[in-house]
Image: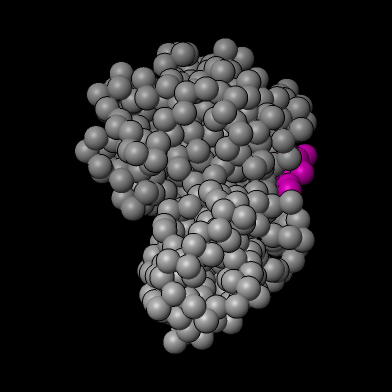
Amino acid sequence: WDNMNNRRIIIVGGGAAGFIAAVACAESSPGTEVVVLEKTARFLDKVRISGGGRCNVTHALFDSRAFAQRYPRGERELLSPFKQFSASDTVEWFAARGVRLKTESDGRMFPVTDLSQTIVDCLMNAARDAGVVLRLNSGVERIERKPDGEFELKLSAAAVGGAADLLVCNRVLLATGGCRAVAAGRLAVDLGHTLEPPVPSLFTFHIESPWLRGLAGISVESAEVSVPASKLRERGPMLITHWGLSGPAVLRLSAWGARTLHDSDYRFTLLVNWLPESASEEISAGLNARRKSQPAKLVVNTPLAPLPSRLWEQLVIVSGIARETRWAAVSNAQLHALVRQLIRTELAVTGKSLNKDEFVTCGGVRLNEVNFKTMESRVCPGLYFAGELLDVDGVTGGFNFQAAWTTGWIAGRAMAED
């Protein structure tokens, strides 16, 4: 471990980005010693538990420009990397190693086995076949760049266990994952990098309204959510929960608004349009027609498609129309108030919960300090980055894994050639 008789490349972090980088590097440069250091007792933990234990490997979107648009932070920087290694390259990479992926109706791609263990085994076997040295319980205390350009890594006391506590190498890749705590980015900072402060991305909204919470479990195929204090607006499926609102539309809004909503301390007004496919005139005309054709029916009992009946009932009541009101008795003013409620429900958001399947923060190493053609640091030659340690994050659906595969693969190849 101490002597440098040949090239050695060390990868700090045994997750998705670190593993694909190690394999790409070792396969491209068979004479190089490639070492993965993982500070915990298991490799690929996040891969193992992601997607409810199924591992959402990537997303079936094969146009690199459209793919890059799914990243609230990193869109511009990822354009060129996705041309080098795209979602279709990921599918091929796994297929070449015996793992087939399938596409679900929403575009998410999973292994056909529906088991994340399939992906873990594939990465572990690929690393072993390529001769990668894998070390667990090997936390790195500090990294120093020597005047000759080599790096010296000091391992934490717990990691040593009889082995040398100093490792020397020619190239280092930091793939330590999202820095939810600033300490996680300390190695990068010590080597001259700047961190964008970490804030949560992909979270659900806490809303106190009792009428809304009473509808927990109801989902809406398409709703539009917006924050009037900013330009944030998203449309898509939405789920009402015991604590407020969740579902793709809300998660996307939280990703694009991660910094803005953090700055508001997660207290802001949210507008919901429950019928985003229809114009207000259209809705108005539909309600007027009800008033003429069903005068004796109770308003709460005649939902407007496609709204679930319990949701319709509550929207009628919060718009100021009493539960026992029949259509014949609805005034123009009440009709107008109901239309407004359907297209512009105002809700006070009072906090957030992290989405249970996601571990995404925005923040990390500042993007202009990294060359995205090679993933090499512009600040410290010979230092590379991959995965969530960068200030890159995607919306939910396999995009964060794809950023890990792409940046890891590029970094691994570049270190091998370097």
Q: Is 284 drawn above or below residue 34 in the view shown?
A: below
Query: Is 398 one of the magenta-colored residues?
Result: no
At 31% across and 18% down in the image, what residue appears?
Answer: 96
Asked whether 220 or 172 is in front, the reply is 220
Q: Which of 18 and 253 is in front in this view?
A: 253
Q: Where is residue 167 in the image (x, y as percent from the top left)?
A: 55, 35
Q: Which residue is drawn at 68% across and 29% down?
A: 77
Q: Residue at x 65, y 57 (%)?
A: 226
Foreground: 284 or 147?
284
Q: Quadrant of the C terminus?
A: top right
Q: Is residue 363 visible in this depiction of the protein? A: yes
Location of residue 362 in the rendering, given as x and y in whole percent from the top left corner: 64, 49
The question of residue 194 being in magenta is answered with yes
Name the spot of residue 298 as percent of width and height, x first. Answer: 41, 79
- In the figure, 264 relative to 18: above or below? below
Near-viewer residue (292 or 76): 292
Mark yes or no: residue 19 visible.
Answer: no
Residue farthest toward the left in the current orientation of the protein: 113
Residue 335 against residue 110 in the figure, above or below: below
Taking the image as shown, residue 339 lies to the left or right of residue 230, namely left
Query: Which range of residues does the magenta coloring cover?
Result: 188-196
Q: Position of residue 227 (x, y in %)?
A: 69, 60
Vertical relation: 192 (above or below) 245: above
